[in-house]
Amino acid sequence: MNAEIQELSPVLVELKVEIPWDRVKTSLDQSFDQVSKRARVKGFRPGKVPPHLVRQLYAKQVRGEVAAQLVEQSFFEAVQQHQLAVVAEPHVQTDEVKDGEPLKFTARVEVRPKIEKVNTKDLEAKHHAHPVTDEQVNQEVEELRMKHSEVSVPDPMRPAKGNDELTIDYTVKVDGVDKPEMAATDRVVDLGSGALIPAFEEGLTGASPGDTKTIEVTFEDDHQSEDLRGKKAEFAVTVKSLRERILPELDDEFAKDVGDYATLLELRMKIREGLQKVADQHSDAALRESLIDSLIEKNPIEVPPSLVMQEERRAVYEYAAYMGMTGQLEQLSEALHGTMHARAERKVKAALLLAAVAREQKIEITDADVDARLLKMSEQTGKHIAKIKAEYAGERRAIVENNVLEEKLMDYLKSVAKLREVSAEEAHAHEHDHGDHSHDHG
């Protein structure tokens, strides 16, 4: 077999293959022999049809089957011969099988790009620490107070104020047009919870049961409903009932009531510890994305379109499943194509470059690494280690392996990159550029 290769791009090659006639003839003879054993031709017993008649009657079928079989075999032989990392099905054009001539075919196929050397010495990344503030701790404490509060009807009745719970009915007009689908009956709202549009909450403050008020609001430009963004609305509200929320005193007894804490100070320390853990995880995730951005910037590579398409489809499906919209995949795919395509391309580039870094730096994972991670998961979740190992046995063990490998890769990139501390504003702007933070390594 002769297989010539032409690189059309870093991710697309063309193979021109010739299969010698003697190999083609051998396959044809074997196939015709098999057909003759089961051929049924009027006037002849099964298996007794003359060979020349079998070849005449079944020529097109056998030649087509033999050509397909030989092309498939020879394609994979050519791939192995040229050590190609194929990532998609080939596009094949095959010549007709002609007696005495080699069988020729051409195959175009996408391949992983060859990454000879990854530039890691020029990496730069942004890092922002997120120290927890007293204000954040106070907010968490207040939310705990709200959860452990009691509600009752004030006596005597008074106008509504912060922390009150109101039951209301309302109808809505948007730009002067009635919106019955937005109307509500017996809706319970909490003043001071931060869940209401500020103008709406301001309009309810000072109202009493039995009052009817007209409250005008302007929806924000980034409102979750695209149809309402920037629109003016008029709410006709009737206040039906008011209950005041009685918050518990903020003392050591409160700390004991909400958990196993001896003092209020101990509760606050535990809250701060939990918030800091989340903040550190957030900072680490942002740093990982900044490292990936720099890795991609310093190592421009072309990626196979098929891998990007696969990743985009996966991302759209996951989003659809999350939103409960799997029945609208086609519409979602069209609507999200621009955003999802860019993210998919970035993710594929990251995966290819990280895999190359792992090979170059001989970054590997061992069974001991995986077992240590499983033990850590057991300690974090409180599940017995045997149960954790059972959950991540077989193919699911690869999930843990990938996580451990990514952590090792990120540790390496952090060690060689120039890290620059940035402001909270700059870090926040950078985080909004990325939606999906996971990476695969192949």
Image: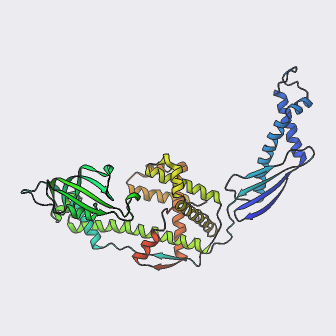
* Quarter assignment of residue 26: top right
- Where 40 falls versus 77 (above or below)? above
Image quarter of the C terminus: bottom right
Left or right placement of residue 324 versus residue 106 in this view: left
Outermost residue on the front side: it is 176
Residue drawn at (69%, 56%), measured in percent from left and top?
Answer: 86
- In percent of width and height, residue 164 lies at 18, 59
What residue is rendered at 56% in x and 57% in y? 312
- Expressed as whole percent of the image width and height from the top left, the position of residue 220 reads 35, 65
- Residue 165 is left or right of residue 279, and the answer is left
Q: Would you say residue 193 is visible in this rendering?
A: no
Query: Which residue is at the front of the view, 82 or 51?
Result: 51
x then y, percent, for residue 363: 59, 66
Question: In this rendering, is residue 39 above or below 388?
Answer: above
Please provide percent x and percent y for residue 296.
Answer: 58, 71
Res 424 visible: yes
Which image quadrant for residue 132?
Answer: bottom left
